[in-house]
Amino acid sequence: MAALKERGQATMQASEFPRAVAAAMSTASSLGLAVDDAIVLHDSNKLTLRLLPCDVLARVAPVAHQVAQFEVELAQRLAESGCPVAALEPRVEPRVYERDGFAVTLWTYYEPVTPREVSPADYANALERLHAGMRKLDVPTPQFTDRVEQAQQLVTNRDRTPALADADRELLGDTLRSLRRVIGQRGGAEQLLHGEPHPGNVLTTKNGLLFIDFETCCRGPVEFDLAHAPEEVSEHYPGVNQDLLRECRVLVLAMITAWRWDRDDQLPNGRQLGTEWLSQIRAALDRNGFDTHG
């Protein structure tokens, strides 16, 4: 279950691209950082740039579409608690900078280390430390069920998911609804979660593994977070409820499958993945004996 990129967000519009880069460069320059060049590292709903020669990571999003202030404040508090998270750029004030309709945040750039293979034990240890730090924080965040509901709404909206066959639409809708109910009825411990701690949101650095992208934070059982990580990771995480983890894995698989059928989804090979994941959902339901019609 690789490529657990959940949201089907469109990439930044091409017409906005040069303005977004200019906003990041001019913001950093105005703060006394040396900026002659910008290298695009990632383009999704946010643009991620490496600014040179100051070597700063800039994240840029349209002001109307971002939760940058929440992410900045949370990252600061987690870093102060010793959590394994990417740090904000220490040479400037840690806040959201607005310029030309964009929100710009500036972060430490971490040179990737090789090999990039991450041991499941190290991954589990880093996630456990992150969760321990998050348990100490009291911040208002949505429940994980709110994220499930977003996927449910997508599945029921034929205009948003026109290519989804009726049988597949029923399968996804039933799976999301029933597992959301079953997991909620377990009444297990819930806490602040990353929300999407898949490998794409983990940096391999000389400082160890660091988590990034906290805009998907939510409250729920730690098994919901573990369901986003490679399966071997959960074998090294203490105290896991295996039945709950199996349910969360199928639930998360149904959620990311729903995003792949969004007409605006921009993930390369997204539709192909969506088709493959539908087959995986059917196999998992059969294997685990889940009844999604209750």
Image: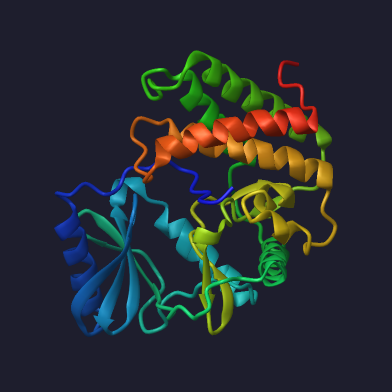
Residue 293 visible at all: yes
Q: Residue at x 67, y 48 (%)?
A: 227
Left or right, 269 with respect to 141, comes to left
Give whichever of 82, 277 is nearer the camera: 277
Q: Compared to 265, does 127 lie above or below? A: below
* Residue 30 seen in this snapshot: no
Image color mode: rainbow
Residue 111 x, y percent position in the rendering: 42, 81
- Residue situated in front as seen by the camera: 270 or 193: 270
What residue is at 70 percent from the left and 41 percent from the top?
248
Q: Position of residue 222 (x, y in %)?
A: 72, 52
Residue 105, by quadrant, is bottom left
> Where 193 sits versus 38, above or below?
above
Residue 126 horizontal/vertical position (percent): 67, 70
Counting every numbered tag in the picture gives 0
Q: Nearer the viewer, residue 188 or 8?
A: 8
- Determine whether 11 is above or below 136 in the image: above
Give the left or right position of residue 257, taking residue 127 as reference: left
Quadrant of res 197: bottom right
Q: Which image quadrant: the C terminus?
A: top right
Instruction: Out of 272 and 249, give the one closest to the viewer.
Output: 272
Q: Is residue 77 left or right of residue 71?
A: right
Left or right, 36 with respect to 79, comes to: left
Where in the figure is residue 57, as x and y percent of width and height?
35, 73
